[in-house]
Image (cartoon, rainbow, N blue to C red):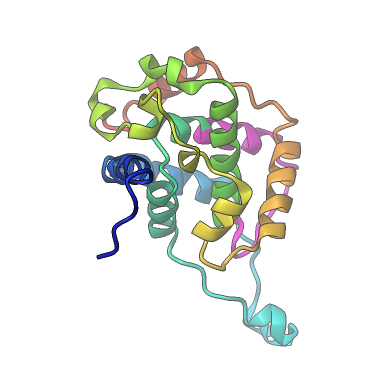
Amino acid sequence: MIHSNNNKMPCSNKNEQSIERIIPLPSVLIDFIAMTVCDLIPPRKMSSRRRQSLPINLSQQPILPELVYFIQKITFQGGIDCRTALVALIYLNRAKSNLPKGAVGGHDTCHRMFLASILIASKFLRDNHCNKHIISIPSTWSHYYSYYYCSSTTTTSSILTNRHLTNLCGGFFLLHEINQLERAFLKLLNYQCWVNDQDIQNFILEHRVDFSL
């Protein structure tokens, strides 16, 4: 084991303590996110004959991770807490209401919509001092509330950036794709990103059965 010098030890211990206190989101919330993005936009239907006629680079698309697993991985490794997930869900609802009629998605639309919503939610809460609004989180979820957003000593590693999210995706989405989907999702929201505590409370109340609260 390699020991660092005394000047660096406090910082290292602090980071280790932060990592140890990350708690996964409740499974019911993970499942609800997955159902929401799947219900957002229907996939494009394609016959086997049409698929065979596509160029190789389109017909042999990479197989993405299963959606629930993907959401679990990104939210855990990204230090996402319940409040951030709820804001992302509110964004997804807003996006759905703004979708053009007859819109269809691709094989990776669910993953992209999730990534865009969670990225913008994380940035919004960072910019608006989310740690002042813990009241909106259901008491039954208090155990799942991330250390990062409860602590007054929030570290920068708890905030999603485009590059950080790219790294979490493990090569499935490149940085320029993350940048593009963020811009597209913001446009879909009509740049209406503001979410207050009452919005979150209303959303929880509306879906309290879905959340088993």
Left or right relative to 40: residue 84? left
Q: Residue at x 28, y 35 (%)?
A: 144
Does the stretch in magenta take in 43? no
Left or right relative to 143: residue 133? right
Left or right relative to 187: residue 173? left
Q: Residue at x 34, y 25 (%)?
A: 208
Frontmost residue, 161 versus 36: 161
Q: Residue 185, position in %: x, y?
A: 69, 42
Q: Quadrant of the C terminus?
A: top left
How many marks overall? 0
Q: Residue 37, position in %: x, y?
A: 52, 47
Above or below 135: residue 70:
below
Residue 12 visible somewhere in the drawing: yes
Above or below 119: residue 206:
above
Q: Residue 194, position in %: x, y?
A: 63, 21
Q: Residue 211, position in %: x, y?
A: 32, 32
Frontmost residue, 99 versus 81: 81
Left or right relative to 63: residue 9? left
**Segment tinted magenta in the rendering:** 88-109
Does the stretch in magenta take in 107? yes
Rendering quarter of residue 52: bottom right
Rendering quarter of residue 73: bottom left
